[in-house]
Amino acid sequence: MTAIADTLVMTGRVMKQVTRSVDTVITVLIMPVMMLLAFRYVLGGAMNYGSFSSSNYILPGILMYAVLSGVSYTGFRLSIDVKKGIFERFHSMPIAKSSILGGHVLTSAIANMFSVIAVTLAGLLTGFKPHADLGQWLAAFALMLLFIIAMTWISVFFGLIAKSVETASVFSYVLIGLGFASSLFAPVDTMPAGLAAFARVQPMTPVADSLRLLLSGQPPKGSLWLAIAWCIGIMAAFWALSIWAYKAKER
């Protein structure tokens, strides 16, 4: 219980930083909504999404883009704690050591899920017409939460090993690049052969495809299990790397 209480206290600390940061609000909320509007009203009519309307195809990609942008602030804030000596100060306090990283991860989950809900509401106002039942909605949001946590642990690791605060969030550009080289914003079949082959095997595509099918009321088939496997594998790998980097900071 002490670890849970300490994690909640640390979460409250980081949440105050999030709510007071105009840059964070713009990145995780305003920019995804602006991209949604651009794809809906500027680019949507110029692209062929097959059986999906432009709104129904694009929204899952925008949700994932919002997460890929938003998790970068976890590494940024964690790096600030490390560079300013706050990290070492926490180590000297009688608190559960797991709460130091746990507070950042839980804050990321809360903030990014808020962004997901806000962008979904914006999508509903601009033509998104879901056909999902309650179970499919819950499955879609559970998958988004799993995706957020997996991406957050990547951010935690880079926040711990970054040589400077400025480089702590550079990894997010790689993740966003992977997003554009997937089915987030365009069907894989419309891509050149080499890029399409890469898009099919990388983790972003099964997550996007699963969200798209779930929200459209269709069975996600094998893509959902592949998406879950990717997320759990990434989360486990970067959790282990983060714990290693964390213990290295203690020495």
Image (cartoon, rainbow, N blue to C red):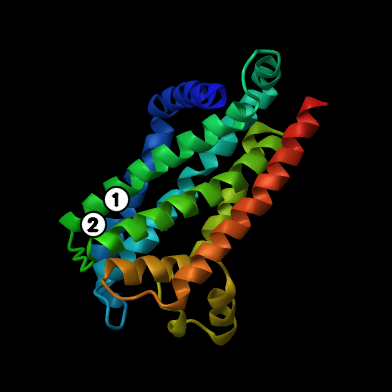
Q: In this orientation, does residue 168 appear? A: no
Q: In this orientation, does residue 57 appear? A: yes
Q: Position of residue 88 (x, y in %)?
A: 71, 19
Mark 2 element type: helix
* Residue at the disc numbered 2: 123
In the figure, residue 47 lies in which quadrant? bottom left
At 22% from the left and 64% from the top, the residue drawn is: 133
Q: Is residue 85 above or below residue 155?
A: above
- Residue 219 left/right relative to 83: left
Q: Position of residue 153 (x, y in %)?
A: 59, 45
In contact (CB < 8 Å): disc 2 and disc 1: yes
The quadrant the C terminus occupies is: top right
Name the residue furthest front. Answer: 1
| Residue 50 image label | none
At 16% from the left and 55% from the top, the residue drawn is: 125
Q: Is residue 201 above or below residue 63?
A: below
Mark 1 element type: helix
* Residue at the disc numbered 1: 119
- Residue 123 left/right relative to 164: left
